[in-house]
Image (cartoon, helix red, strand yellow):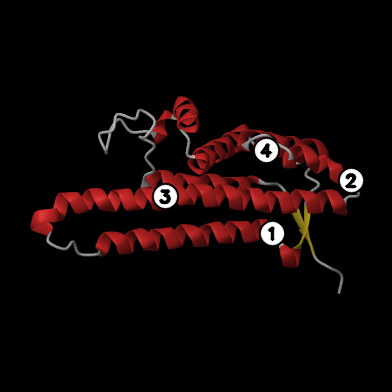
Amino acid sequence: MSRVVLPADADTVAGALADIQHRRSYVEALVETMEAQPTPEPERYGDHDAWYLAALQDGLFRRVFVVEYRAWRSRIRDLVRDQLSAQGLDSDLWRPAEEARDAAAFVFQVRLLLGDELDCELDAEVWAGLQELAAVAEAIAESSRAARLELADRFPDYFSDLDVFGDGDPTGRLTLSHALAQRAFAIAAAFWTALPYETVSEPS
């Protein structure tokens, strides 16, 4: 049984889910607003502006991945460290996660900590989703050819065969769509939804 226990009046898991839903709704509103704007000179620039809008949205969706991963990372760090302290466990148990060499290693260390120290087990697909979210966010943040090549090898669905700028760069096709942005939100929400914990009320 999970040893994660949170005060009922400070349920950080519920708070994380509420924040994700708010950000998802905000992005949906932004997309709707962008797509509702009229195109100046549609007869002359209609096709160009459709491409340009897609490029602008791609930038927005890239930030979704980066923000959702970083938000998860910050929240899980605070939660695990607080739980270790509350249960009298050695704070150095967090050090391997803090010193993880990359995002994949960080997710792996968090999984070990939750399972081994807090009896908090989640299904493999939840962790696989987080590894995906972390890999995409890290490739975007690093913005190197090597990072994109590695990501394309692991998650080819994030790449398009379309060479938009005609520069022949085989790693330049990382394409973030609206559907993939929704997937980022779903992955982050799935973790907090699946996390087993209990809440307790403070005695009055």
Q: Check disc 2 and give the amino acid type.
A: Leu
**Residue in the foreground of this view, choosing between 161 and 9:** 161
User: Considering only vertical position in the picture, is 107 above or below 50?
Assistant: above
SS at circle 3: helix
Whole-number angstrom distance, CA of label 3 to CA of label 2? 39 Å
Task: Report if the CB atoms under discs 4 and 3 are less than 8 Å apart.
Answer: no
- Report which quarter residue 25 is drawn in: bottom left
Q: Which residue is mark 1?
A: 12
Give the left or right position of residue 21, taking residue 122 as reference: left
The percent position of residue 125, horizontal first and vertical second, equals 58, 34
Q: Which residue is mark 3?
A: 61
The percent position of residue 131, horizontal first and vertical second, equals 58, 35
Closer to viewer: mark 4 or mark 1? 4
Q: Check disc 3 and give the amino acid type.
A: Phe
Give the farthest residue toward the right: 88
Circle number at residue 89: 2
Closer to viewer: mark 3 or mark 2? 3
Whole-number angstrom distance, CA of label 4 to CA of label 2? 20 Å
- Report which quarter residue 112 is drawn in: top right
SS at circle 2: loop
Circle number at residue 127: none
Residue under the point 16% across and 49% down: 47
**Residue in the foreground of this view, choosing between 147 and 158:** 147
SS at circle 1: helix
Q: Check disc 1 and give the amino acid type.
A: Thr
Q: Earlier in the sequence, mark 1 or mark 3?
A: 1
Closer to viewer: mark 4 or mark 2? 4
Give the farthest residue toward the top: 153
